[in-house]
Amino acid sequence: HKLGWFTNKNFRKAMVHAFNRKGLIDAVYFGDGQLLHSNLSPAQGKWYNDAVIKYEYNPEKAVALLEGEGFRRDEKGVMYDPDGRKVEFSISLPSGGKTWEDMITTFKSNLEEIGVQLNITPIDFATLTRKMDQTFDYDAAIIGWGSSSTAYDHSGSKAMYLSEGIYHMWY
């Protein structure tokens, strides 16, 4: 049933609207960061596109998007899907990375505000990639991809970005 959530465009939009990324920059990076609306920064020059859709932090809109898809909150504010299942999922991330864990803890707190429960599962990188690439035994995952170099040629990431790419791991 969770695959149904994640393949629903409005569910994914709701998760982004529920995420206070500016709050994350302030809390985790002490305000020393730039709010981005894609995985590319302006430092990437020709690869950067400021015209992408911007999903601003708006928990009310997140709830409205979910309600528009038949999700409902109970009297305690807990979110349930149209079939009455509590909206709860796990996110796996590489263990040992304090910054990753701090970022996901912020996301967890944001999702609690809209009634969604997020469980954080740190796991060693080899096991995580095996789950993502072979067994598919995970709800959601976060890993780094590419290079921090501003000279990085993003056309080399077509294997991830294109739907038919071997590393394209979402719908």
Image (cartoon, rainbow, N blue to C red):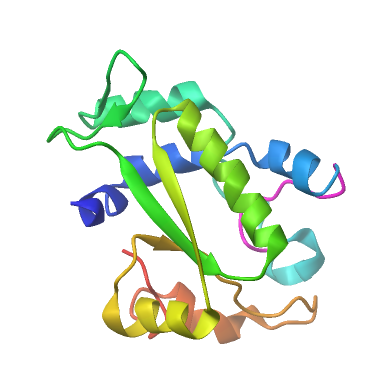
Q: Residue at x 47, y 73 (%)?
A: 161
Q: Is residue 165 left or right of residue 52?
A: left
Visible in this render: residue 70? Answer: yes
Q: Is residue 72 left or right of residue 23?
A: left
Q: Is residue 33 magenta?
A: yes
Q: Position of residue 96 (x, y in %)?
A: 65, 70
Q: For the image shown, how many numbered marks are present on the structure?
A: 0
Q: In the displayed orientation, state which residue is furthest to the top.
A: 75
Magenta range? 31-40
Q: Is residue 87 magenta?
A: no
Q: Residue at x 35, y 66 (%)?
A: 170
Q: Residue at x 42, y 37 (%)?
A: 14
Picture quarter with the C terminus? bottom left
Q: Position of residue 48 (x, y in %)?
A: 69, 63
Q: As rendered, which of 96 and 164 lies closer to the eye?
A: 96
Q: Position of residue 125 (x, y in %)?
A: 53, 80
User: Which quadrant of the structure image shows residue 162?
Assistant: bottom left
Q: Is residue 130 above or below residue 45?
A: below
Q: Is residue 138 above or below residue 74?
A: below
Visible in this render: residue 37? Answer: no
Look at the magenta stretch and give its main secondary structure. Answer: loop
Q: Position of residue 117 (x, y in %)?
A: 40, 39
Q: Residue at x 74, y 61 (%)?
A: 41
Q: Is residue 6 left or right of residue 48?
A: left
User: Which quadrant of the structure image shows residue 26?
Assistant: top right
Q: As rendered, which of 11 and 23 lies closer to the eye?
A: 23
Q: Is residue 40 above or below residue 162?
A: above
